[in-house]
Amino acid sequence: MKVSVAHAGNFKLDGGAMFGVVPKSLWQKANPPDEQNLCTWAMRCLLVEEDGRRILIDTGMGTKQDAKFFGYFHPDNPDALEQSLRALGLGFEDITDVLLTHLHFDHCGGALYRSDDGGILPRFPKATYWSHRAHWNWATRPNEREKASFLQENILPLQQAGVVRFLDETGQSALPAALSVQIVNGHTEAMMLPKIRIGNRTLLFCADLCPSAAHIPLPWVMAYDVRPLVTLKEKRETLERAAAENWILFFEHDRMTECCTVEKTDRGVRLKETFALSEVGRGD
Ligand SMILES: [Zn+2]
């Protein structure tokens, strides 16, 4: 089992939306905003190599949206994912599987690209794209609150190309034994959190359950979440288990911190140590 960061670049989102009910006087210390109240966030994907498969978890927002769209989100390097894969000695055609935690644009937009003739095609031509049926149905018939995050041009062309499979229908055996998923329903319906065994450790890809290290304290829940009280419960259970079992938490959106461990304190579960993914496995 080999895991590597595949970075899809940084982008910006409103600090208030990212920190929910937490006052700016507190969150601005964790992630200082610009003059428009926008904070910078990573789109840090994870490459898992096992049993001859190269599984990419999430894809960033991609390159196919128009300038107006990018003007809202300020991606700093649209070619970051391609460059990051190349630095690992890989091209788009080497990816065998793409696991999409959920279909919000900053997680799945890079799964497709716009070809020279204007068609929208799978970015990874040999890959199977994994989603969850309940989430797919939710995303393709979006509620008004999430509609701006579920861009249909990020979703439907995958189905039209016949490359989507649903992990809940194929079962866990479709993945290498060391990779499983945990389903959570607070951020959106049926988001998949990949969980990876690395030696004797467990790495949890936190996706939007806990987008950055600043979101570890329970009330730090994004305003985007459709069921914030469900997120609270899911975070409590997940972080307590992470503390008890010394899990590695991998952050998709934390600009500075790739990974951390957590510990139980009398104020609840808190950050213990931060480290780079490349440090994982040394000495295990
Ligand atoms: Zn999301």
Image (cartoon, helix red, strand yellow):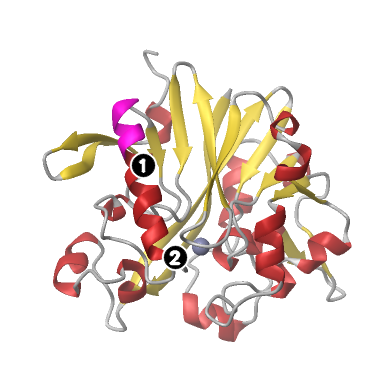
* Magenta segment, prevailing SS (helix, strand or loop): helix
- Provide the residue designation for mark 2: 227
Where residue 64 appears, as percent x and y from the top left, is: 69, 72
- Viewer-nearest residue: 191 or 47: 191
Quarter of the figure with the C terminus: top left
Instruction: From the viewer's perspective, tell me whether residue 197 is left or right of residue 51.
Output: left
Q: Quote the CA–CA distance across marks 1 and 2.
A: 16 Å
Q: Is residue 59 magenta?
A: no
Q: Residue visible at 57% across and 59% down? A: 107
Instruction: From the viewer's perspective, tell me whether residue 20 is left or right of residue 30.
Output: right
Q: Is residue 121 in view from this perspective?
A: no
Quarter of the figure with the N terminus: top right
Instruction: From the viewer's perspective, tell me whether residue 173 is left or right of residue 177.
Output: right
* Helix, strand or loop status at disc 1: helix
Q: Which residues are magenta?
A: 240-245
Q: Residue visible at 24% across and 52% down? A: 217
Q: Quadrant of residue 150?
A: bottom right
Where residue 166 appears, as percent x and y from the top left, is: 75, 48
Q: Give the mark nearer the N terminus: 1 vs 2.
A: 2
- Provide the residue designation for mark 1: 237
Q: Amino acid type of disc 1?
A: Glu
Q: Residue visible at 34% across and 55% down? A: 232
Where residue 155 appears, as percent x and y from the top left, is: 73, 66
Q: Residue visible at 37% across and 30% down? A: 247
Q: Is residue 212 in view from this perspective?
A: yes
For ligand 1, tell me if the residue under mark 2 lies within 8 Å.
no
